[in-house]
Image (cartoon, rainbow, N blue to C red):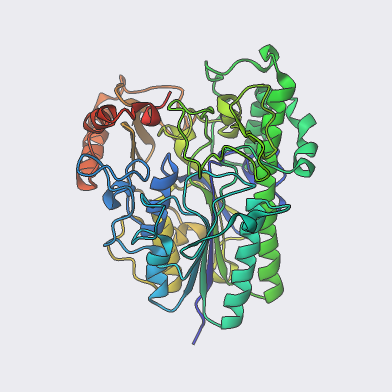
């Protein structure tokens, strides 16, 4: 009897579409570039525009609203969403474990409203035999609140030269080695926190990038688009105009500090890539790399959030007030807070996020292309996935679970997604509508058309095959298409339990939380 393939799903956190080398970026990502040479890239793969919804959709194969994760992890019932995946919606881990797989999660969970004490929403109770990582949406890379299984680890677990990305890689490699020796097929969900803020990276990794980013975001956006064209990616014919809220690089008053921000971000990406490379090397040494289904993507587009946040409130687990040795941590995006070390807590801001999303509009939280377009790389040589292939056919994060289950002969009943295996093997994508909603931002893509709107604003219509930069609104010229797609979106929204944004926003206002959910 043929053994089922092992499965490795690697999820980056807030990685922009063009950050990876094989998607146009200048960050050194040799492992992901290698994975792309062994497999296939999707140039039109989509996720949701926020962390938790994408994770819920990835693990259930259903739209996040449908399983109770419409915003983040706050339990807002009866007015809003439950904030964690519905227990009646089986996760990919539960489905794989039921057919003999050993399962593990290393990294970020961010799908539990309750993080103080274990409950039915924790990963060990949603199909994962093992869990090693963090429960919140963001943490310090030097002193994170680690959980092993259902046990909170003491501060000594992060003593010395600790760095979270490296630790997650260590655990992942250990799991793969143990699972391989155990003889059963395994599923590893490796959910790195990188490169989500805070900007934390080792000096040795940051130093190589300082001069590189003194070129500035304007020139680098041009270079990235040119590289995307050279690589044959279906992105945009021309570079859309710079976001009006982003200054010209030549007018930047603190270029060295700005370059430092992006240098630290790039170092975080490279550290993650180094971890992926270590795993690929291990699988190759075991002789199992060809028959391991490997999928890599991001959970949303690049993040333009500034620190401190508009609400000014971050939990201690997310933003510790002191370093491990007792020094005060300085939070904020200003030149007097140098990013990278443990005593800083910063993000890289809108200007660099604009570069990361080249050539798309807007960012995480929005459903224009900059918020939902993700790089995707998949490799499975023994399963007929194209080596060095590329597909422009669209896919959605709800498709990952059914793709994995089709590959291993598992059950896909009740899922909204469709398998992408045929696309990865060189066949044309089946045309179907893809949908989004987050914080009142809404979109549907069907064939050549994408209908999209920001909360409270009119619908915009784009020929997404000719204009992925979303620069030419055709709504006035094709009112019939707007009407048809709007109806299509409304039917989907009703069927998946999307809560009307005005109603949800009123609830947040009553609780004084509107600043935490309103995009700036």
> In front: 413, or 300?
300
- Quadrant including the C terminus: top left
Which residue is rendered at x = 36% and y = 35% of the image? 449
Which residue is rendered at x = 52% and y = 15% of the image? 244
Where's residue 409, x and y in %? Answer: 41, 74
Q: Can residue 35 be seen in this view?
A: no
Q: In this view, does 183 lie to the left or right of 282?
A: left
Q: How many marks?
A: 0
From the viewer's perspective, is residue 326 above or below residue 167? above
Q: Is residue 426 left or right of residue 218?
A: left
Q: Is residue 296 left or right of residue 434?
A: right
* Quadrant in the picture for residue 355: top right
Which residue is rendered at x = 36% and y = 23% of the image? 474
* Quadrant in the picture for residue 240: top right
Where's residue 389, x and y in %? Answer: 59, 55
Which residue is rendered at x = 76% and y = 43% of the image? 205
> In front: 13, or 115?
115
> In front: 323, or 113?
323
From the viewer's perspective, is residue 414 above or below residue 183? above
From the viewer's perspective, is residue 250 above or below residue 18? above
Q: In this view, does 86 lie to the left or right of 99?
A: left
Where's residue 268, x and y in %? Answer: 66, 43
């Amino acid at each position: 009897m043929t053994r089922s393939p092992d499965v490795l799903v690697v999820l980056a956190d807030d990685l922009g579409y063009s950050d990876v080398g094989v998607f146009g970026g200048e960050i050194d990502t040799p492992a992901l570039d290698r994975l792309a040479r062994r497999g296939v890239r999707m140039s039109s793969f989509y996720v949701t525009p926020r962390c938790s919804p994408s994770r819920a959709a990835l693990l259930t194969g259903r739209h996040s609203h449908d399983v109770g994760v419409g915003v983040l992890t706050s339990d807002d019932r009866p007015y809003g969403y439950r904030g964690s995946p519905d227990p009646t919606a089986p996760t990919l881990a539960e489905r794989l474990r039921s057919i003999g797989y050993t399962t593990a999660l290393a990294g970020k969970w961010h799908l539990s409203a309750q993080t103080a004490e274990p409950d039915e929403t924790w990963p060990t109770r949603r199909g994962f035999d093992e869990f090693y990582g963090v429960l919140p949406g963001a943490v310090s890379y030097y002193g994170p609140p680690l959980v092993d299984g259902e046990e909170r680890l003491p501060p000594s677990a992060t003593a010395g030269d600790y760095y979270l990305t490296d630790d997650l890689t260590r655990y992942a490699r250990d799991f793969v080695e143990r699972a391989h020796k155990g003889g059963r097929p395994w599923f590893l969900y490796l959910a790195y926190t990188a490169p989500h803020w805070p900007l934390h990276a080792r000096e040795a990794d940051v130093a190589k990038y300082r001069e590189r980013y003194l070129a500035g975001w304007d020139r680098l956006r041009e270079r990235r688009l040119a590289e995307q064209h050279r690589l044959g990616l279906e992105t945009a014919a021309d570079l859309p105009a710079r976001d009006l809220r982003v200054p010209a690089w030549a007018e930047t008053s603190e270029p060295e500090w700005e370059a430092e921000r992006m240098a630290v971000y790039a170092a975080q990406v490279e550290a993650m890539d180094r971890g992926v490379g270590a795993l690929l090397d291990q699988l190759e040494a075991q002789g199992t790399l060809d028959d391991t289904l490997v999928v890599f993507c991001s959970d949303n587009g690049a993040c333009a959030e500034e620190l401190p946040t508009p609400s000014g409130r971050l939990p201690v687990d997310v933003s510790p007030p002191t370093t491990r040795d007792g020094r005060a941590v300085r939070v904020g995006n200003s030149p007097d807070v140098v990013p990278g070390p443990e005593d800083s807590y910063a993000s890289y801001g809108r200007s660099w996020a604009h570069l990361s999303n080249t050539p798309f509009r807007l960012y995480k939280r929005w459903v224009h292309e900059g918020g939902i377009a993700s790089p995707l790389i998949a490799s499975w040589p023994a399963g007929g996935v194209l080596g060095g292939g590329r597909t422009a056919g669209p896919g959605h994060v709800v498709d990952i679970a059914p793709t994995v289950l089709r590959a291993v002969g598992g059950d896909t009943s009740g899922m909204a997604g469709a398998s992408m295996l045929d696309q990865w093997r060189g066949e044309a994508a089946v045309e179907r509508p893809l949908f989004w909603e987050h914080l009142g931002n809404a979109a549907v893509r069907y064939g050549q058309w994408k209908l999209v709107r920001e909360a409270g604003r009119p619908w915009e219509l784009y020929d997404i095959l000719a204009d992925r930069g979303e620069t030419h609104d055709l709504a006035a010229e094709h009112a019939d298409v707007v009407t048809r797609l709007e109806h299509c979106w409304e039917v989907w929204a009703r069927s998946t339990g999307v809560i009307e944004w005005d109603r949800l926003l009123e609830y947040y206002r009553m609780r004084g939380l509107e600043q935490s959910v309103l995009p700036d």
